[in-house]
Image (cartoon, rainbow, N blue to C red):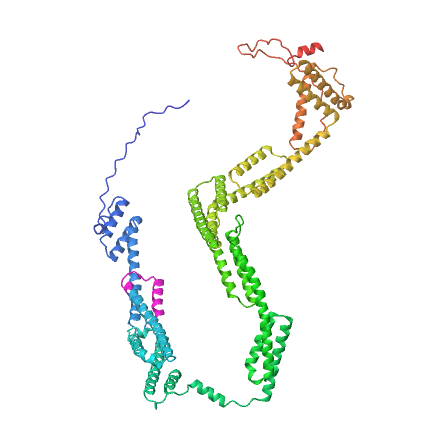
Amino acid sequence: MFPFISRNKTPETPEPAPAPAKAAAAPHPLDGVTGGAFSAATSGERAAKVREWLATNPGAEQLQEVFKELSARDKGAAKAIRERMDEMRRAKGQEAIAAEWAEKADKLLGASKLNIADALAWQRDAAKAGAPLSREPLSALKTQLADRVKTIEDLQHRVQVQREAAVLLAQRVEVLSTKSYKDAQSAEAALATDVQHWQDQAAVLEGDASWGSVEARYPSMLEASKSQLLLVWDAFQSALKQTLAAADDAQAPLPTVPVWADEIRAGRGLPTEVEQAAARAAAAKPAADPQESKRAKQVVQEALKALQAHTAEGHGKGASSAAQQLRAALKQHGKLIDQDLESQVNTALIAAGELEGWQRWSADKVREELLAKAQGLLARPEGQELGGRKLQEALRQLREDWKKADQSGPTNHALWKKFDEACNAAYKHVEVWLAKVREEGAKHRAEREALIAELKAWVEAHKPSTDWKRIQRDLFQFGDRWRASGHVGEKAYAELQEAWKAALHEASAPLHAAQKQSIARREAMVAQAVELAAAPNLNIDAVRELQRQWQTEAQSVPMDRRHEQKLWDAFRKPLDEAFARKTQQRERVQHQLSARDQAVLDASKALEAANHSGDAARIQAALDGLQQALQAQQAPVSAEPAAAAPAPAAVPATDKDAAAEAAPAEEAAAEDGGGAGGAEVAAPAPAPVPPKPVIAQRSGDDRPGMRRDAPAAAGRTGKPGGDRRDGRD
């Protein structure tokens, strides 16, 4: 079938003679420069040769030439050369920038006046331009500018200090002018030393090399302080010198300082300036004007009537206010009223004083009650002592009531002293309680801080964990422990609560993210459930798989109960409606069955029950009933075509048995079809054709070990037990 193939695979034609070996390539001219980089066998060796050659720091022209030749052969080995060339180019550019900004810095330092803003702007702009400020010479120039700016700022600060010192020295001089000239004479030497020291310091500031760079307002400020101090000091010295001369010579003029002049007058036995002014005023006092006297009398009478009205009505506060107004009017116009009106005023004031005494008595009654309450705070029987907080509130309320009593009448210092002692004695117990509260607060604060630290450590330990149920349980436990922690102050609690919220948010962030993803997956399953429920035929397998997925998701990711129940209701609702619709369809199909169909179904169920019981007589009776039901169902259907074709004479028993066995299967199929969710009821089946007699024959014995061409032995036909049933028939 196949042609013979020669086993000799040697070609008959002779092999061509090998080509002569190529002559050895000539070495590259730059091979000696680079140390054999061009003649290297592999790319790795070539790169190593290039690195060794770059370590010798070749020039820019040589680098350019080698890169041009080597990049055409091996770009990987030439990469190091390109990087060296780029580095040299950047270094050259930075040198140019550094030279430019160094020149600008030299100009700033060389100027006689340095502006602080320009010095700061130089550093900012140089950094923006990419100048190497960390290298020389820019680093040294930057340090020099910073020192220069610091010196200028120090000078400006010292000027402000000098101005304050000048103000203080001037105040010392002014204070001495209000005292005896002898005190001023004793303090003159110390003042002279301080003033001279101030002038020396000002001269040092003005002689500083950086004084010209100080802002313009500072030199003027120092100059104004200097002129003011020297002016006050010169006036003090001249006045003191004149005062000493007047003290030694009675004919010498008095000084311009009023206190010192009065002191000299007193030493000479002359009236003081105040006494002289009073005498001049008394001498120059004109006679009383009748109109002024009439107006003063009218004002005093109006104030007197108001006081008498309040006194008659018993208004304590109103009487006190009216008495004050009457006293003020009497003080202003007392010299212009007559003697009768003045006596009426005194009588009214005495009556108001009696009313004030009654108010003092009533206020003292209130104070005595408050004193008794304060003393009774610690005199309570056992079991009725007030707690720390209640005792503190009671003391606060008692002190408020005492203030109100003081406002309604004059104070009573004796009762106040007793009341204050009783309150202080009770407050000692409050202090003990406060100390205990502070101690407990510190302890509780430490516990809360430890809980926050524990939560943070728990977050670090459970970062890779995906056991969301355990994570949620641990977070709930942390929350319960936080709520069960003790009391702390409001301020401390606000700080701790903020730290706790931050730590809890960090701890619950993975769980919240997982819950968010779970919600998205569940919403997708809800949409899928709606889609399955809307299908004409409900896919039970798909529904079961979807329910399994929902259970898996619910068991893996916990979430809020209300939200989870809401999603579950949304998921279950369309499926429940679909199953309810299917049940309704099945019931509708069952209701639409005829009486004969129902009889067939009942007979098939009876046969099934008989099969389960195993009773032969019962099974036979059930078979007979089912056969009769089928015959009753087929009779009216076959009545119509009876006219067209003659009915068969008889049906063999075996065919009747087959029909009896087929009927339950058909009814079961019809029941299954209704249960599958079909919406329409099947049309009535056509009249069955009378079955033909079937005779089973064997062409041979097909049992193992038997001959196929031999006829088989005759056996019973029909189902087991058919011979007995035929015999009975």
Secondary structure mostly seen in magenta is helix
- Against 685, is 414 above or below? below
Q: Is residue 19 left or right of residue 617?
A: left
- Against 18, is 10 above or below? above
Disc count in the image? 0
Image x and y of residue 522, in percent:
55, 41
Image x and y of residue 442, in percent:
44, 50
- Against 141, is 243 above or below? below
Quarter of the picture containing the C terminus is top right
Q: Does residue 661 appear in the picture of this structure?
A: no
Q: Does residue 264 appear in the picture of this structure?
A: yes
Identify the residue at the far right of this view: 643
Instruction: Check if residue 300 falls in the magenta segment.
Output: no
Image x and y of residue 184, in percent:
34, 79
Quarter of the picture containing the N terminus is top left
* Between 142 and 589, the one nearer to me in the picture: 142
* Between 624 and 372, the one nearer to me in the picture: 372
Which span of residues is magenta-colored? 115-140
* Between 652 and 6, the one nearer to me in the picture: 652
Image x and y of residue 549, in percent:
54, 36
Which residue appears at 25% of the width and 47% of the height?
48
